Amino acid sequence: MSNISMNEIPSKRISSSPGEESRRLLAGILALMLTACGGGSGDTGGGGGGGGGGDVAQCTLTEEQRANLTPADLNSLPAACDFLDTPPLVGLFILGTEIDQNNGDLKLYVHGVKRNATPMTLADFQQATVTVGGNGVNRPAEWDVVNAPAGKLSMALLSDYSLSITDSDVVGMGDLYDDVLNNAPAGFEAETINFSSEPGASPTTPAITVKPEPGDHWTSNLQALLAANDFDPNQDRNNTTLFDAMGTALMGPLNHRFDPTADNLGLVERNGPLGAVGNRPATLLMVQSDGQDNDSQTLNLGDVAGLLDRCHTTVIVMGTFQTTLDVAVLNALAATRGEFIQALNTNFLRPAMEPYAESLGNLVVFNLSAGTGFAGKTVRIEVDNLGREATEYMGSFDFDGNCQLL
């Protein structure tokens, strides 16, 4: 991502009184401390931070300090500010599954970060514990694991451009997504989505920009994707359209309402029954937002959560709380299907996410023999006392139609 001087970026933050700014900061910090961060089916490390209520009043920062503070700066601040430090995101993630049409084996696409904040490697996965229906299965007789072949992963990367997100955080998220793309496994494809709404439009019009352009947006061209992450001064910046943007990532154009005969532009359609597109069983949605959705026109929180569940899509939700943050919404989106991590700003978020980004390059595939009798049973994979379960075996596109928007 190109380096952009902050004085070259138009300031489009919501203007507020100092009292309002303080109220927002305190609300975000209290939400940070009082709400458990992360989720996941099984044992995951989660992310975020915490601190004692008595520390909040002692950790006073100006707006400029909040925007530019880095982890290194904590050394020069009172101990009361230590709760701002953001632990790395750790956990094990199953990005998709498929059935081998040749032998009936189950394939699970997996990556993860160990508790010591280092990416899991093939050697780590070879030491995994695997259970089917609660019963252990043995390697190599019943399961084995290898590096995933190229061309198996699709990713959608979403950035909140609403006015409640600071310019510095918008730029920082582009840098973080650059890290993700630069570490992604060979042959991946991706698209990026910036979202807000048009200021002054009546009725409000969502401003959801899918990149790269032109074409169907999905591409394996790294340089085009990196350019799509650059700060976009032409993107409309008004209210938040988080739910409609996530629906666009999952289903493609919302007017198609997840009709796989109309297009193949949704994340969950990339491994669906659309000819050559149907060869990407691993899918990942990453979204940065404050969760303050007030302008989505088509979908609500329940719609999106239902889609994520029915389509078995892993989602990583990231929030920065130097302005506002709806922790309940962001936790609900992550739920057991992924993880939620929050930080003061992207200066803290990016290093906390670096091990996760690096772990994508170590994507592996677990092969479970049809003889394990996995059909209709829960499969659990555990590494470093971090686990995740899979209970659906058709990838993120559900061929019986249950993945459609209800």
Image: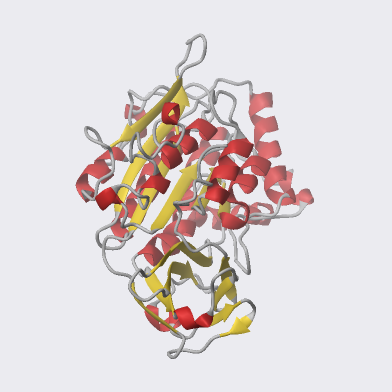
Coloring applied to the structure: secondary structure
Give me the residue at 43% from left, 35% from top.
Answer: 248
Q: Looking at the picture, does residue 100 appear above or below residue 242? A: below
Give me the residue at 24% from left, 50% from top.
Answer: 220
- Name the quadrant of the N terminus: top left
- The image shows residue 191 at horizontal and vertical percentages of 33, 43
Name the foreground residue: 111 vs 370. 370
Q: Looking at the picture, does residue 274 appear above or below residue 380? A: above
- Name the quadrant of the C terminus: top right
In which quarter of the view is residue 180 placed?
A: bottom left
Q: Looking at the picture, does residue 384 appear above or below residue 268? A: below
Give me the residue at 37% from left, 68% from top.
Answer: 363
Q: Is residue 378 left or right of residue 352?
A: right
- The image shows residue 393 at horizontal and vertical percentages of 49, 64
Q: Answer whether residue 325 is visible to the viewer in this image.
A: no
- The image shows residue 79 at horizontal and vertical percentages of 66, 57
In which quarter of the view is residue 119 placed?
A: bottom left
Name the foreground residue: 303 vs 88. 303
Name the foreground residue: 268 vs 37. 268
Q: Answer whether residue 211 is visible to the viewer in this image.
A: yes
Q: Is residue 339 left or right of residue 28?
A: left
- The image shows residue 216 at horizontal and vertical percentages of 26, 37
